[in-house]
Amino acid sequence: MDTYDTHPHSTLRSWLGVAAITASLFAFLTTELMPVGLLTPVSTSLRISLGAAGLMVTLYGVSAGLGVPFIVAWTRRVNRRVLLSTLLAILTLGNTITAISPNYPLVLTTRLIMGFASGVFWAIGVSMAMRLVPPRHASRAAAIVMSGISIAAVVGIPLGTVLESLTGWRTTFLIWAGLSMLVFLAVAAVIPSLPSTNAVSVREVFGLPLKNVPLRLVLFTVVLFVLGHFGAYTFVRPYLEQSTSATPFFITAALMVYGAGGAAGNFVAGYTVNRDSRGSFIAGCVGLVISLLLLLTIAHGQAGSIVTLILWGVSFGVVQLSQVNMTQAAAPDTFEAAMSLNTMAYNTSIALGALFGGLFADHLGVTGVVWFGVALTAASLLLTLGTRRKTAHPVPDDTSAPTREQAVPDRT
């Protein structure tokens, strides 16, 4: 039987631990997507094409996605506090090497290694937070950790763009290395020992979608919308520069508007996903398709761009939270194992989206990248509409405390 650890820690320290894990998510996600806001200066500085610069996102996502089920299995007996500290140390060192790297091959190699660390965090982070608090607060802890996604979109990536405009892209990565070190120290200070209590083999992880039809459908929809969204979003800066002659200041403002929209979408979805996660996902996907079409039609001026990015951000915030709840609803008793598959699908799709987007950008121009996004997000929407309501089961909220058997276990 899967059980939660007894809750021996003080309430303050428990929630400080949840905050430290949220900060970890912020550090990992902003590091992963930082090149989105720095694509043009990086490509200019290293004398590479925009498509080649996009590989900084591609390789990071490949290793984060493909490596996670194996590494989680190989480290299944490692104390989770020790494992998270190690991952943050790798992140700190990787950002430092990126900042001082003399050539692009070293940058790509470093990003590849950092991606492995990021993927493992996505698989264990939510489960760690849920173990720190009493079972009745587990879903609240998970929601707080996932809010790091919106914080990264609102603050992290735009802040990186601002820092680049003031100091240069290398200094930006060096500053992020310092931030990663601070998070490392916070984890070491406030997170207690969390021994791994459940061993999950690689075979068991990969067997889940074979016998769990709802989870398999969720993974397919995740692949399609992430391919479309990140294929287009990775190249939003060069698109706005070409379509609106946007300045670095406007790019920064636009990314902040997008991030604020994502936070708003996440907030709205917080009230809808527990009632109907499938319906929330469908609504968000409709918004993604419409926003990308608007990007092609009305975003040739700054006002149109801002309106489009607000809708895009809100829609992505809704879709992002919905797909996490859909994963939990599809596999409530094997959530961490399911999340490792979700992480694999999600991050691999980010990588492939950036890769395909780069090919479109280099051969058809950045407008072709947006059309690629329209096609894939529409495919995700159609797949969800064409399937029965197998992923819409409600996820219990904090108003009714789950039993130990109902609570999401630590499956590593």
Image: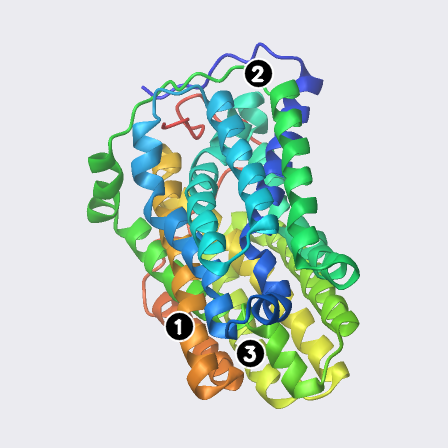
Where does residue 158 sit, x and y in percent of width and height?
71, 59
Query: Is residue 12 found left or right of 269 in the rendered image?
Result: right
Q: Which residue is drawn at 27% across and 38% down?
A: 205
Give the number of the disc on residue 356. Answer: 1
User: Label 1: how many residues lie within 10 Å, few (<14), some (14-19) or many (20+)?
Assistant: many
Query: Is residue 159 found left or right of 1 in the rendered image?
Result: right
Q: Which residue is drawn at 77% across and 82% down?
A: 303
Which quarter of the figure is the N terminus placed in? top left
Q: Is residue 298 above or below residue 191?
A: below
Question: In 3D space, how far apart are the residues under numbered discs 1 and 2 (Cα atoms)?
Answer: 42 Å
Dot 1 amino acid type: Phe
Q: Residue at x 56, y 72 (%)?
A: 287
Dot 2 amino acid type: Pro
Question: Which residue, given by chain and number where applicable, does mark 3 sit on?
Answer: 292
Q: In this view, does 294 lie above or below 182?
A: below
Q: Residue at x 74, y 66 (%)?
A: 252
Which quarter of the figure is the C terminus placed in? top left
User: Label 3: how many residues lie within 10 Å, few (<14), some (14-19) or many (20+)?
Assistant: many
N-terminal label among 1 and 2: 2
Residue placed most toward the observer, 339 or 178 = 178
Question: In 3D space, how far apart are the residues under numbered discs 3 and 2 (Cα atoms)?
Answer: 44 Å
N-terminal label among 3 and 2: 2
Where does residue 387 sit, x and y in percent of width and height?
32, 64
Residue 378 seen in this snapshot: no
Residue 365 seen in this snapshot: yes
Where does residue 76 sit, x and y in percent of width and height?
34, 25
Dot 3 and dot 1 residues touching (CB under 8 Å)? no
Q: Is mark 3 on a helix, strand or loop?
A: helix
User: Label 2: how many residues lie within 10 Å, few (<14), some (14-19) or many (20+)?
Assistant: some
Front: mark 3 or 2: 2
Question: Which residue, given by chain and number where applicable, does mark 2 sit on?
Answer: 192
